Image (cartoon, rainbow, N blue to C red):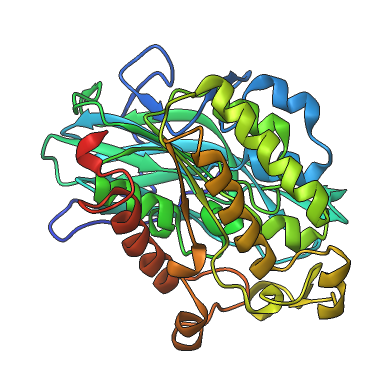
Amino acid sequence: MTSTSTTTAPAGAIHPDATRAASGLVDIPLVGGPLTIRGAVWIEPTERGIFPRRYLPPAAHRFVDEFMRATMSQSAGIRIAFRTAARQIELRVLSTRLADFVDAPPTMATYDICANGEVVSTASSDIGTRLVLVDRNLSAVVAGGEAILNFALDGQEREYELWLPYADEVELRGFRADAPVLASSAPSRPRWVHHGSSISHGYVASRTTRTWPTMVAQASDLELVNLSYAGNAMLDQSTARTIRDTPAAVISVKLGINVVNGDVMRLRAFRSAVHGFLDTIRDGHPDTPLLVISPVCCPPVETTPGPTVRTGSGDTAWFESAGSVDDVAAGKLSLQVIRRELADIVAHRFRHDPHIGYLDGSDLYGTSDNLRQPMPDNLHPADDVNELIAERFAAAAFGANGWTPRSSL
């Protein structure tokens, strides 16, 4: 089964006729040709195409459940770079997305083509396989077919990046264009490797280009590798090793919220796990600027420990804490405890590691911000909050007076 997506394009662009034979389109090889896959740390070949991966192969043997595998396989920050004067681009994919239940209505996945950091063409599709999970493990697979994404461009030769949807695992199966496609000739940019939770992964932004790490990377002219895994920023050693073994000019790690969400640690274990996570990163990046970021405001668990529980689904989803504030005295973790501990850990390490820094997440989005711009599900930022976080982070981390100015990278 195949489906042609809806397509939008800038004014004056020639829209492709989705029903006609694409005889004017020429196949472009996914590997070994002019296309560059950015934002992935490994390319896995398949019988029909390739999977761009955000984890290194050894991590695949250390997935603790299907939810970890699924979210780490999603395409946050992955894009295809190329140069062309084409008016039409066609991308063929087989995508896999999580669903709340077997009969859940399909949701649209959005693909954006950007030039100079601006979206110039968009295509969407609701075709693909759906995974239904119960208690983080696989319950059902609803098989789906290929989708064909059609993009309209204006025919001017430019550098482009085609961003994949952050919530989909995407097998790339074909790329075609109606004009020659050249390798990107854009100057190389400093590589920024970022790790975080669903808030950095992208949930519930409208598309990848509206997630805060993507906006920061485009505003600061950085090469983003987004190693953020929704629900799975748990200080796993497999993640630390992926960061350790991935080339980077600058690294940031946003830690703590998933540990509280899942109620998976007490204070004693958290302290040791953070040190071990940072030690592993430093094994591969002893002098690379490393910024530790604590959680942004999350009302359910600011002073109350997790676990967080969800009611409803889709647009009606809402998160609250099932913990008790009295449990903090017994070593359970709230976000206030997490922020205090991360600040202390970084201050301790800074004595021997002058390249490490700390950023309080509540400076990016705090309680007063939440009152003015609440999160739609009480946990994840929509586009407006992503934009706010991006603006503040870009200034605090990479601005002229920031922790590591962009000009120094």
Does residue 163 lie above or below 132 as drawn?
A: above
**Residue sitting at 58 percent across and 21 percent down?**
283
**Residue sitting at 41 percent across and 27 percent down?**
37
**Residue sitting at 71 percent across and 32 percent down?**
237
Rendering coords of residue 256 (x, y %) = 66, 56
Position of the C terminus by quadrant: top left
In the rendered view, does 288 fall on the left or right side of 256?
A: left
Say which of 118 and 279 sits in front.
279
Does residue 232 lie above or below 40 as drawn?
A: below
Rendering coords of residue 318 (x, y %) = 70, 78
In the rendered view, does 274 fall on the left or right side of 356?
A: right
Rendering coords of residue 49 (x, y %) = 55, 23
Rendering coords of residue 301 (x, y %) = 70, 73
Residue 46 shows up from this direction: yes
Say which of 393 and 76 sits in front.
393
Say which of 99 and 289 sits in front.
289
Residue 266 placement: quadrant = bottom right
* Most distant residue in the bottom direction: 371
Position of the N terminus by quadrant: top right
Residue 337 placement: quadrant = bottom right
* Most distant residue in the top direction: 32
